[in-house]
């Protein structure tokens, strides 16, 4: 595509020059130089900032759509096992999106085991009024199970909180390295589980098949699975090297949307005294990465939800999620020695980050 686009752009540039349209000439030259810079940044992802601002700075994504055809918000609100979220929190999230200047996008809710946070899920269940408004919301859940019977039970559990008819995204959670046959080949049990979830799609009970992992080597293997529609991967300021060198290049190559999670490293990043970062900074850092389509975050209360959504509401007036200087400072401080952070046991595969 790169070698097709450039000649066409130069043809238009020449035509503009012949017509003595100086402003168009300048615009095309600027566009071409920007495109070249973007291509270099994708190839050299480890050393560079995150991608083409014109394409990446947006509030919604059309790579995941609701049943009614609405693009979903790039901030997905999830249930938090480590805190008690109020019943009102999911409703506030919905209302904030509906009251936005651009209300064409949809809320995206995610919950693991639905029995772990009853108040949050009570609010999730109230986020739609009937089967029509249900089609305007994206719900995702899943489980760690791999047997067909256990997967069936997990789907039934998830459906109980989103209308009972269908789940938008089913996630095969926490895929481990021992579930692979090789660096690129999925193991038989995992593939059978994916195939079983695909049967839900054929039955119109699930719309997207997804998988999550804490290993970026596993993420690389999952990105080549044609039967998956999206992958959940860990990514944050203090955990970026493995993502940017192992999984993200393959994800971009295969055009698989990434749902980034643990972007605050279990809220540890905001507790550092200096340089201080906010939840908003953590969300922004992840969103500027070209491979990341959605950030999955579990706001603990309404104030944190406001902070998390702030950059998305402001992005219509922005050309970049964050400045190059801020990005460089964050990478230098939080990412220069990732193993120094691992006294919390967060990184289960530290060898991937070396």
Image (cartoon, helix red, strand yellow):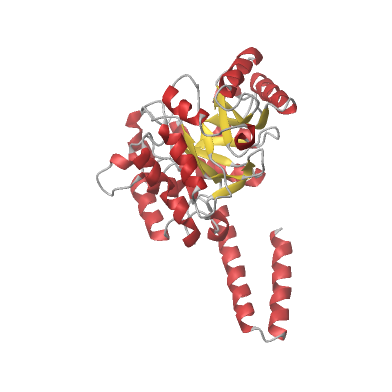
Q: Residue 152: name its quadrant.
A: top right
Q: Is residue 318 visible?
A: no
Measured as percent of width and height from the top left, residue 157 is found at: 56, 19
Q: Considering only vertical position in the picture, is 136 above or below 7?
A: above
- Please tell me which residue is depicted at 56% across the width and 46% down the height of the picture: 291
Measured as percent of width and height from the top left, residue 344 is found at: 34, 30
* Closer to the camera in the image, 30 or 123: 123
Number of marks in the image?
A: 0
Q: Is residue 76 visible?
A: yes
Q: Quadrant of the C terminus?
A: top left
Q: Quadrant of the N terminus?
A: bottom right
- Please tell me which residue is depicted at 47% across the width and 51% down the height of the picture: 312
Measured as percent of width and height from the top left, residue 229 is found at: 65, 36
Q: Residue 339: name its quadrant.
A: top left
Residue 318 horizontal side relative to residue 196, left or right: left
Residue 44 horizontal side relative to residue 330, left or right: right
Residue 262 horizontal side relative to residue 186, left or right: left
- Please tell me which residue is depicted at 65% across the width and 25% down the height of the picture: 165
The residue sitting at the left extreme is: 273
The residue sitting at the front extreme is: 129
Measured as percent of width and height from the top left, residue 323 is found at: 42, 59
- Please tell me which residue is depicted at 57% across the width and 47% down the height of the picture: 105
């Amino acid at each position: 595509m790169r070698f097709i686009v450039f000649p066409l752009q130069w043809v238009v540039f020449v035509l503009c020059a012949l017509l003595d349209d100086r402003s168009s000439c300048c615009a095309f030259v600027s566009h071409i130089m920007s495109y070249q810079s973007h291509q270099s940044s994708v190839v050299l992802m480890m050393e560079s900032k995150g991608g083409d601002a014109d394409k990446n700075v947006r509030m919604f994504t059309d790579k995941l759509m609701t049943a009614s055809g609405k693009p979903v918000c790039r901030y997905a609100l999830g249930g938090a096992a480590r805190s008690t979220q109020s019943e009102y929190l999911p409703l506030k999230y919905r209302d904030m999106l509906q009251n936005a200047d651009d209300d064409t996008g949809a809320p995206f809710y995610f919950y693991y085991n639905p029995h772990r946070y009853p108040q949050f899920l009570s609010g999730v269940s109230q986020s739609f009024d009937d089967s029509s408004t249900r089609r305007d919301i994206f719900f995702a859940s899943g489980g760690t199970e791999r047997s067909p019977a256990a997967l069936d039970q997990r789907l039934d559990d998830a459906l109980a909180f989103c209308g009972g008819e269908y789940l938008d995204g089913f996630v095969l959670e926490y895929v481990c390295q021992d579930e692979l046959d090789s660096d690129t080949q999925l193991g038989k049990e995992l593939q059978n589980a994916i195939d079983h979830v695909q049967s839900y799609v054929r039955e119109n009970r699930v719309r997207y098949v997804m998988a999550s992992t804490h290993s970026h080597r596993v993420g690389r293997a999952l990105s080549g699975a044609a039967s998956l529609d999206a992958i959940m991967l860990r990514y944050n300021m203090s955990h970026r090297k493995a993502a940017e060198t192992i999984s993200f290049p393959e994800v971009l190559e295969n055009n698989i949307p990434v749902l980034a999670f643990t972007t605050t490293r279990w809220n540890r990043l905001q507790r550092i005294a200096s340089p201080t970062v906010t939840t908003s900074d953590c969300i922004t850092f992840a969103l500027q990465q070209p491979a990341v389509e959605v950030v999955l975050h579990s706001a603990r209360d309404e104030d944190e939800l406001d902070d998390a959504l702030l950059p998305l509401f402001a992005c219509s007036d922005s050309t970049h999620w964050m400045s190059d200087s801020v990005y460089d400072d964050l990478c230098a401080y939080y990412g220069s020695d990732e193993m120094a952070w691992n006294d919390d046991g967060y990184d289960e595969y530290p060898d991937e980050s070396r």
